Image (cartoon, rainbow, N blue to C red):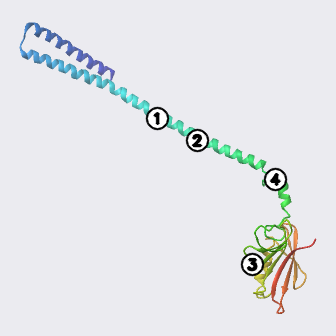
Amino acid sequence: MNDAFAFLLLLSVIFLFIAIILWVILWFKKKSLKLIELTTILLALFVIIFFNASGFSSSPSKTSFSQEDNWSNSKDEAQTDDDSEDDAESSTNSSSNENDESNQNDPHSVTNGSSSENDSNKGSNNKIYGQLTAKGENLSDGAYKDKNLDYVTYGVNSDMSINVVKEDFSDLPLDPKLDAHAINEHVHDFMEDDASKASTISDEDSSYYSEIIDKGYQVHFEKNDKGEIINIKIFKQDA
């Protein structure tokens, strides 16, 4: 491309040189108009060739600049993506470290072995040996109605740990034989999930045991004259 530009520039200089000589000759010798026209044409060729040569030489340079800009933009975009990835990774690591520190400093963290051991023999909330967390109507000192089940009453200690649960079925008594499945469910509603019958003391009394909390329960059925169950009471079993 540089060789072509040099050739065109040289050609335009030659035409310019010839045109100047012809103009000088015409000026002093007063030649015909045809020579003047020829000279004018040579000058016009000089101008055309010169400007074409200038445009030709500048085109590669513009292309080069365009390519360099594209490369530079690509490089900047790649750098931006890298920076974004670094920021995201840094944010994730920072969050993880904060959570780790929080867990280490939290006295109630699950990793606290002593806390887990202390809770191993405590019952679930709203069950015998557990805490009453959903208090309903306060019937008397230490007795609360269930918040959602109006037939259930809790007897609690001052720390709201549950001693006894009474389920009242006086309005709709349960038949020990026909309603055996429902009775079993009502009994287990306020024990730990693994509780099973340990012994039958009488028709009205039974004992149950939970391995999860290593504690026992005593269940008492209160019956009417027809032998139907009108109340189920679940107690902590005396040691």
Q: Residue at x 33, y 25 (%)?
A: 58
Q: CA distance from mark 4 to mark 3?
A: 38 Å
Q: CA distance from mark 3 to mark 2?
A: 58 Å
Q: Is residue 204 above or below residue 52?
A: below
Q: Residues within 10 Å of mark 2 (few under 14, many from 20)?
A: few
Circle count: 4
Q: Is residue 210 above or below residue 233?
A: above
What residue occupies the far left of the structure in this picture?
32
**Horizontal and vertical percent position of residue 216:** 88, 72
State the residue position of label 3: 150
29 vs 182: above or below: above
Residue type indicated by callout 2:
Glu
Q: Earlier in the sequence, mark 2 or mark 4?
A: 2
Q: Which mark identifies residue 112?
A: 4
In the rendered image, residue 190, in percent from the top left (x then y), is placed at 80, 73
Residue at x 84% of width, y 92% of height: 225
The residue that label 2 is drawn on is 85
Q: Residue furthest top?
A: 28
Q: CA distance from mark 1 to mark 3?
A: 73 Å
Give the residue at x 41% y 31%.
67
Disc 3 element: loop
The residue at the point 52 percent across, 37 percent down is 78
- Mark 3: few/some/many CA within 10 Å (<14, 14-19, 20+): few
Q: Position of residue 119 (x, y in %)?
A: 84, 61
Asked if disc 1 and disc 2 are in contact, CB closer than 8 Å, the reply is: no
Element assignment for label 2:
helix
